[in-house]
Image (tube, rainbow, N blue to C red):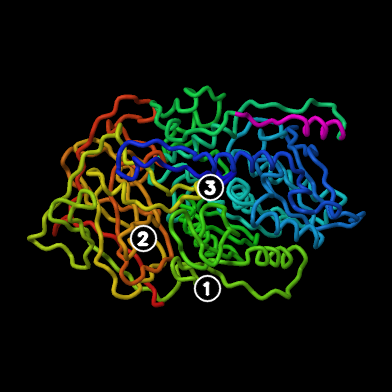
């Protein structure tokens, strides 16, 4: 859904001390990003791919849908293809064609495909760029996708075999479309496309709009620039040459400049975040008013329990894609159980940064080893196999994954890999786990009768714990969390240093026994690797809104002071904790602005402006234990 470019949200020095902060885009990075976007608009797709003199392209070609709406397509063909019928790679996107095909992976891959005899077709989603209609995120996307495939099969340059490709927004529509099993849809490469997953076994967060029932506010930033319901369209009746000239002279995208995400998200009520900044109507205004159990979500073209496909798939993502790694793994697990030829590849980078790996791969402030991987050859051979019937490439293992800190790519027959050993570490303290200076611990021993019972903190929504890294759309996704851990409203629990390397592979699940003075509140959990020098780096995070602790079907408020056990899922990783390192979890009630704040009133939240503070407790006694569970593998 989200990534146009790796947006480097960074924070002021005050963040490192746990004080109130603002998010800024540093001057050099802002200028570089603006130049990147400007250059992407100026270059033609052929220039962006380095194919000048070797390919030809046709811009803003109208593609009629069954309801008469015309989408805008860009067609790239090998020069001299003549009357040849070619296999086709289809990319569906809300972004400009040049922006969509640019990048360290896409440009070399698509250039290679065109050189080897593929046609590339880029179609803008309904209501974006020069496509007509009104944008509706994944609503009617399957119908449009089916019509696009029909249209491609009728073109003189098409041999009727289509593979779909793309990352993030151009990945999300692929799995739902594959469930229709269109005869021309032969293969897909879905990268960071778990936005298209609605409710399947182990995952129910409606296209990553929520995390444990808490809205993801990164959507508000995306809708600020994209997905406007009213936008310019090309006049009808223009010939193709005039359409191309007009489209080259004007931009259909709004120009609001770079948003300060924190300032944007801080507005109350939440439903007016965009309206207050003067943005025209978008779907955000309606989506934020829904709940995870609202029947309106059934109108969206998500993958749901019971779906299956015959379309072979590469599901590709990264451990540091903080919002999509978990559902990517879940959709692979689900489809590999009922659909043939499903494969998973999980790398070490941030969201849609595949192809940027080096011999010392960095994800923000953290180096994770030699993560280099030849995605271009992998994907090109995958397309050759299914679109050119080329069986010369070796069979792919079902799972390929990188282990953070190891400089090792591993293979497996299943996910999670077989041979793991389940491990549980219990939260404990002497009653004061608040901040790093407290005494929170992770221990293998279960609580005993003399164990101190609880830790307590005050959640003030108007002074939330700031997000530092995480989310999906920052290249600074891994950050040193020391400043966050200076706060008294953050509980910190650490293991002893490991004597030998501990390899964690698979889901990380946290069970908390909690109580609150509020009828509803949130609990946020962050998983960290603390290096031998004491620097804590985030691995993953998750959340739960307590009113949804028993599922999204029914809202259940809390009774003040009563204890509840709640299980938080949504975290997955493959990482080595090296000798001298420690495993740590942080518990808080805000992680803002990555997650919406709970105003703790028990009301709708989206339409409220008056919060109340909550006194929240995490219990860890013999009767009410709290613990983290994960699976270890031998190295």
Tell me the quarter of the image containing the N terminus.
top right
The image's mark for residue 411 is 1
The image's mark for residue 118 is none
Q: Secondary structure at mark 2?
A: strand
Q: Is residue 247 magenta?
A: yes
Q: Residues in magenta?
A: 241-255
In the displayed structure image, the side of residue 610 where residue 298 appears, left or right: right
Res 505 quadrant in image: bottom left
The residue drawn where x is 36% and y is 37% is 21
Q: Earlier in the sequence, mark 2 or mark 1?
A: 1
Residue lying farthest front? 28
Q: Is residue 391 magenta?
A: no
Q: Earlier in the sequence, mark 3 or mark 2?
A: 3
Q: Earlier in the sequence, mark 3 or mark 1?
A: 3
The image's mark for residue 508 is 2
Measured along the vertical axis of the image, is residue 475 above or below residue 425? above
Q: CA distance from mark 3 to mark 1?
A: 25 Å
Q: Pick the residue in front: 332 or 307.
A: 332
Label 3 Cα crowd, 10 Å radius (few <14 / some 14-19 / many 20+):
many
């Amino acid at each position: 859904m989200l990534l146009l470019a790796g947006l480097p949200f960074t924070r002021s020095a005050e963040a490192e001390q746990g004080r109130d902060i603002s998010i800024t885009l540093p001057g050099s990075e802002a200028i570089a990003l603006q130049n990147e976007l400007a250059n992407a608009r100026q270059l033609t797709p052929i220039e962006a791919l380095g194919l000048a003199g070797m390919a030809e392209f046709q811009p803003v070609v109208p593609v009629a849908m069954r309801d008469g709406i015309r989408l805008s397509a860009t067609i790239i063909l090998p020069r001299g293809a003549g009357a040849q019928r070619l296999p086709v790679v289809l990319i569906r996107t809300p972004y400009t064609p040049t922006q969509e095909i640019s990048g360290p992976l896409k440009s070399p891959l698509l250039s290679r495909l065109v050189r080897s005899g593929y046609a590339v077709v880029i179609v803008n989603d309904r209501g974006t760029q020069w496509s007509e209609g009104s944008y509706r995120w994944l609503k009617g996307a399957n119908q449009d996708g089916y019509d696009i495939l029909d249209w491609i099969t009728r073109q003189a340059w098409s041999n009727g075999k289509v593979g779909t490709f793309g990352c993030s927004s151009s990945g999300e529509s692929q799995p739902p479309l594959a469930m229709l099993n269109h005869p021309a849809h032969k293969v897909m490469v879905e990268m960071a496309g778990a936005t298209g997953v609605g409710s399947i076994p182990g995952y129910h967060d409606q296209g990553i709009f929520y995390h444990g029932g808490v809205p993801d506010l990164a959507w508000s930033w995306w809708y600020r620039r994209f997905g406007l319901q009213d936008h310019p369209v090309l006049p009808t009746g223009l010939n193709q040459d005039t359409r191309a000239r007009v489209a080259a002279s004007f931009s259909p995208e709004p120009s609001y400049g770079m948003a300060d995400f924190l300032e944007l998200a801080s507005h109350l009520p939440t439903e007016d975040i965009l309206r207050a900044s003067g943005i025209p109507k978008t779907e955000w205004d309606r989506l934020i008013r829904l709940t995870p159990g609202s029947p309106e979500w059934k109108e969206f073209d998500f993958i749901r329990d019971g779906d299956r496909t015959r379309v072979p798939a590469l599901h590709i993502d990264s451990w540091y894609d903080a919002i999509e790694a978990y559902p990517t793994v879940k959709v692979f697990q689900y489809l590999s159980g009922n659909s043939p030829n499903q494969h998973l590849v999980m790398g070490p980078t941030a969201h849609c940064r595949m192809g940027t790996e080096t011999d010392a791969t960095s994800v923000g402030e953290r180096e994770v080893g030699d993560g280099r991987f030849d995605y271009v050859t992998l994907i090109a051979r995958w397309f050759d196999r299914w679109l050119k019937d080329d069986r010369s490439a070796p069979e792919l293992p079902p799972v390929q994954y990188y282990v953070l800190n190891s400089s090792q790519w591993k293979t497996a027959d299943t996910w999670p890999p077989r041979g793991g050993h389940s491990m549980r570490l219990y939260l404990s303290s002497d009653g004061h786990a608040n901040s790093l200076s407290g005494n929170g611990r992770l221990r293998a021993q279960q609580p005993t009768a003399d164990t101190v019972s609880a830790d307590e903190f005050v959640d003030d929504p108007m002074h939330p714990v700031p997000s530092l890294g995480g989310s999906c759309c920052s290249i600074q996704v891994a950050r040193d969390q020391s400043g966050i851990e200076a706060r008294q409203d953050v509980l910190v629990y650490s293991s002893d240093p490991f004597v030998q390397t501990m390899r964690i592979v698979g889901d990380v699940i946290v069970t908390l026994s909690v109580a609150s003075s509020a009828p509803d509140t949130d609990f946020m959990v962050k998983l960290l690797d603390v290096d031998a020098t004491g620097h804590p780096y985030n691995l993953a995070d998750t959340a739960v809104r307590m009113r949804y602790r028993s599922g999204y079907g029914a809202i259940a408020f809390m009774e003040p002071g009563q204890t509840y056990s709640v299980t938080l899922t949504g975290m997955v990783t493959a990482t080595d904790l090296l000798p001298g390192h420690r495993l740590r979890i942080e518990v808080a009630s805000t992680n803002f602005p990555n997650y919406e704040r709970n105003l703790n009133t028990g009301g709708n939240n989206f339409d409220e402006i008056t919060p109340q503070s909550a006194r929240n407790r995490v219990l860890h006694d013999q009767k009410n234990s709290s613990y983290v569970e994960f699976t270890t593998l031998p190295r």
